[in-house]
Structure formats: C-alpha cells, structure tokens
Image: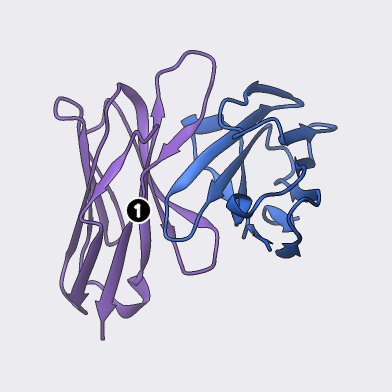
Amino acid sequence: SQQGEEDPQALSIQEGENATMNCSYKTSINNLQWYRQNSGRGLVHLILIRSNEREKHSGRLRVTLDTSKKSSSLLITASRAADTASYFCATDARTGANSKLTFGKGITLSVRP
Amino acid sequence: GAGVSQSPSNKVTEKGKDVELRCDPISGHTALYWYRQSLGQGLEFLIYFQGNSAPDKSGLPSDRFSAERTGGSVSTLTIQRTQQEDSAVYLCASSLQGAHGELFFGEGSRLTVL
C-alpha cells in the first residue's frame, strides 16, 4: 500500500528559486524521512523528522511535519541545477515489532540553469 | 566496504530463467531491506531482514521470489522462472536502527527479462 504520497508529481523551477514539495500519509508514524535519487542511482538520505518534531533544518533543506494533518513538506532554498533529481518521502509506521519504510512515488524536480 | 554493494549492476535474462541478486550491506548493519523500483515509479517494499531472520516478507510478489541472509551480512534475492513483469531495478538498503533511522541504499541491480 502507498503510505506516502508526494505532491506535485513534477516541479520545474529556475535556479535560485525555492522548491517546495509536499507529502501526505495515512497512518500514525514514528518518523518521516526524505530521500533523493539521481537518475540511475540509489537513494540518498536527506533528513529525518520524528513524530514529536515540527520542523527541522539541514543546510538548504527545511522539513516540516504536521501530524494532525498527516503531512510534511520539504523546502529547498536557493535551488541549484545540481538539485535536479527525484525526491521521495518515506514513513516508518507504528506497526509493532516490524520496522520498514514505506515510500511514495516521488517528485521529479528540474532546476533550470 | 564503505557502502552497500549490489551485484550484478545489470542483468539481462530470458523469460523462464532463474536469477540471483546479491547485496552486501554496510558492516555492522543488522537491518537489511529489498525494494523494487519499476520505471518511473516509487519503491515497492519486498522484504526486511533483522539479522538472519525475516520478520516481514509481506512484499514478495509471488512464491517465485525468495530471499535469504546468512551470517547477518550478505543477502541474496532469488527470482525463479522470471517473467517480463519482473523487469525492474532491485534496490537493497541497510540500517543500524531499522526504519527508525537512516537507510543506506546500494546502487541497485537492473533486471531486464526478455
């Protein structure tokens, strides 16, 4: 089942602009993570936010989490052409002993030079 | 090794053949995951290992798919009697804390079934 669903599916912006990507999920979570995937490569972890946190920063990245709305957003400030990639949100649902991340379908971000 | 290593990176096979995909996780990582990614799609969970046991194998699509992990390290994903719909990139990830922490992904094994 698809726990996390990202929005929009594709985003095209000019270098220097900010990029905002959203993720919604369905069940209670322990944490939510964002990953990046360059074409033809594996996924790289960007940031993790726990269910008791509301906002987190890492360099040019800002993540927010609203557990009441079951949603998260990833903001990339001052985007660069090198930020062009697919971005996935993933949730660690509260399912007892089992521990797996469920990924959304991803957002394709294109940053034009 | 420094990261998660997967082999082969590319595999082309004929329908009906068996294939084995290998994953060598980061040393010391007790949790290991297999995911499948079809063209332009998200990641589909296949199986999760904690040590050598698989508490969650709910994502394996059919009984043609199996996976094992030995010595708490290397894992092998086996697909028997491959079908064209099995064509995808198979991604392996390992973690110290399971899904409570960061997953480290390999570069994937691209499987093409003709």
Q: Nearer the viewer, residue B100 or B50?
A: B50
Up the image or down, B79 lies above or below A66; here it is: below
Task: Please name the residue shown 27% across and 25% down the image.
Answer: A52
- Name chain B's colour: blue
**Residue extending furthest right?**
B71
Q: In the picture provided, is B43 more to the left or to the right than B63?
A: left
Answer with the quarter of the image where residue A82 lies: bottom left
> Three-letter amino acid code at disc 1?
Gly
* Mark 1 neighbour density, 10 Å: few (under 14) some (14–19) many (20 or more): many
Q: Which chain is purple?
A: A
Q: Nearer the viewer, residue A84 or B26?
A: A84
**Residue extending furthest bottom?**
A113
Q: Position of residue B54 (x, y in %)?
A: 68, 24
Q: Position of residue A105 (x, y in %)?
A: 36, 49
Q: In the picture provided, is A97 more to the left or to the right than B11?
A: left
Q: Nearer the viewer, residue B56 or B60?
A: B60
Q: Quadrant of the C terminus of chain B?
A: bottom right
Q: Position of residue A54 (x, y in %)?
A: 20, 34
Secondary structure under the numbered disc 1 in the rendered image: loop
Answer with the quarter of the image where residue A76 lies: bottom left
Q: Chain of mark 1?
A: A
- Residue at numbered disc 1: A106
